[in-house]
Image (cartoon, rainbow, N blue to C red):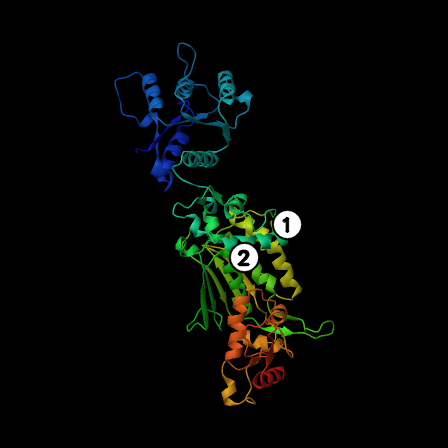
Amino acid sequence: MGKIKVFISSVQSEFAEERKALAEFPRADALLGKFFEPLLFEELPAVDLSVPSVYLKEVGACNIYLGLIGAKYGYRDEEGVSPTEREYDEATRRHKTRFIFLSNHEPAEREPEVNAFIEKIEKEVVRSRFVELSSLQQNVYHSLVRYLEENGFIQLGPFDAQLNPEATPEDIDAEKVASFVRLAKSRRGFTLDESSPTFKILHHLNLSQGEKLTNAALLLFGRNPQRFFPTATAKCAVFHGFTKTKPIPSYKIIAGDLFEQINQAVEFVMSQLDFRVGTRAQSNIAPGSYEIPREVVAEGIVNAIVHRNYANHASVEIVLYKDRLEISNPGSLPLGWTTDRLKQLHNSVPHNPFIAHPMYLAGYIEQLGTGTEDMVKRMAECGLPEPKFIQEQDFRTIIYRYTPQATPQVTPQVTPQLTEQDKAPVSTAVKNLIKVLEGEMTRDELQEVLQLADRKYFRTAYVNEALNGGWIEMTIPDKPTSRNQKYRLTEKGLKAKQEWKK
């Protein structure tokens, strides 16, 4: 298929420079240049035809008629009609797409014929105004891109709303959908029941058309989303210093659906942060707090995963340094926004609206645009610097762990009073578990005091490691899966806990 021809028209004595600039604009643009071929009368080869005939022939051969209307009407033929109006009439008669742009002149500044011409145009075509060349180019750009979109040359709808041609109904995990419904019903009063057909639920969420699935459906509820989007993952790492220097003490690539990625990424970070235990003045379970509030960590990770650009082949990166947590994603703020706007109440403009809505229903995000503002307030309440939001090639959030003026107490290493055998390295997660374990406690009680939600991650990163290291033991060891199972510190765990208190 040839290029889409755009006939650029105006009174010859007006907008000569603008017509030339508009012709060069698509030729120099990486996107528009692939699709459009501008046509200017000045650039047409000489032919043995009358000027009006050439004009009208080119209008008939074009796909788009682009007219600039200013203050002058121009040359009149024997019937008193200008070539510009003749061209417009020919484009109308042949049902061409017409884009009309009016200069910012007042009616009194225009010739009477121009005002009459504009009145005719306004009855047939939506027209735009321009003040200068830059605004004219912007308006033309949007009009041409919209033409490509509406005629199927490109698809500019949100990535998450696009139907995936390779997906089948079998790619959706029905249990994930049912689990979501249970959560959404409890948190937001979702109207459908978990017993509803899976595709009825997806259709209600605008995630399917018939049995065709959107990208959002696969990312949220897919059995294996990475089969379709290999880089839709969260890369998590820990460095003991202030920069990325090897060796990497802890590194994990988190795959799965977006809910799983958020849950596991949050738990990964929390398992690396120091937990300080409070007193039991008002509860049998001692309250405690992390050096970074959990809700701040969660908000930063949710924003990165929900609002990233999934058409980009980079992954979300979550890196914990000695002094800060950095969360970056291949994404950008809405056009015209600055990072300062995120620190105050603002409208919610999600990059992936069809991902964001289920996340809202499940209670992961708010729709009022308060999340980043709440991060700033919560950090201030904890005496920590406000987060930094940086927009460069990617979008980055920096959350500080401490400042030189307010350094949180870091858990000391195991002291020499323990035996040499007991001084094996202990993960921060296991240390935190030992610090909060009092007497005999269930897994649910331990998760509650440590503010952890993901049962699988808690079992593998906390309980199993502590059991394998001999720091804790089961109260019913011969029935490890008993619902009455509790955990208590071993002699080794008790000794370490006492030493750490010192």
Looking at the image, which is closer to me, 394 or 102?
Answer: 394
Circle 2: is it few (<14), some (14-19), or many (20+) Cα within 10 Å? many
**Quadrant of the rendering where the N terminus is positioned:** top left
Query: How far across and how far down the image is residue 165, in percent?
Result: 39, 45
Q: Residue at x 53, y 61 (%)?
A: 263
Q: Is residue 306 above or below residue 109?
A: below
Q: Is residue 285 left or right of residue 262?
A: right
CA distance separating discs 2 and 1: 21 Å
Give the labeled residue for mark 2. Answer: 302
Question: Residue 258 location in percent, x, y?
Answer: 50, 56
* First in sequence: mark 2 vs mark 1: 1
Q: Is 218 in front, or is 118?
A: 218
Could you tell me which secondary element the residue under label 2 belongs to?
Answer: helix
Image disc number at residue 342: none
Q: Is residue 353 left or right of residue 445?
A: left
**Residue at horizontal 53 percent and vertical 65 percent from the top:** 325
Above or below, 268 relative to 193: below
Provide the residue designation for mark 1. 189
Q: Residue furthest left?
A: 48
Q: Is residue 135 left or right of residue 493?
A: left
The quarter of the picture where residue 439 lies is: bottom right
Q: Is residue 365 visible?
A: no
Tell me the amino acid under the disc marked 2: Val
Disc 1: CA contacts within 10 A as few (<14), some (14-19) or many (>=20): few
List x then y, in percent, for residue 185.
Answer: 61, 52
Q: Is residue 237 above or below residue 494?
A: above
**Looking at the picture, how far across and down is residue 31, in whole percent?**
38, 41
- Would you place residue 262 above or below residue 404 in this image? above
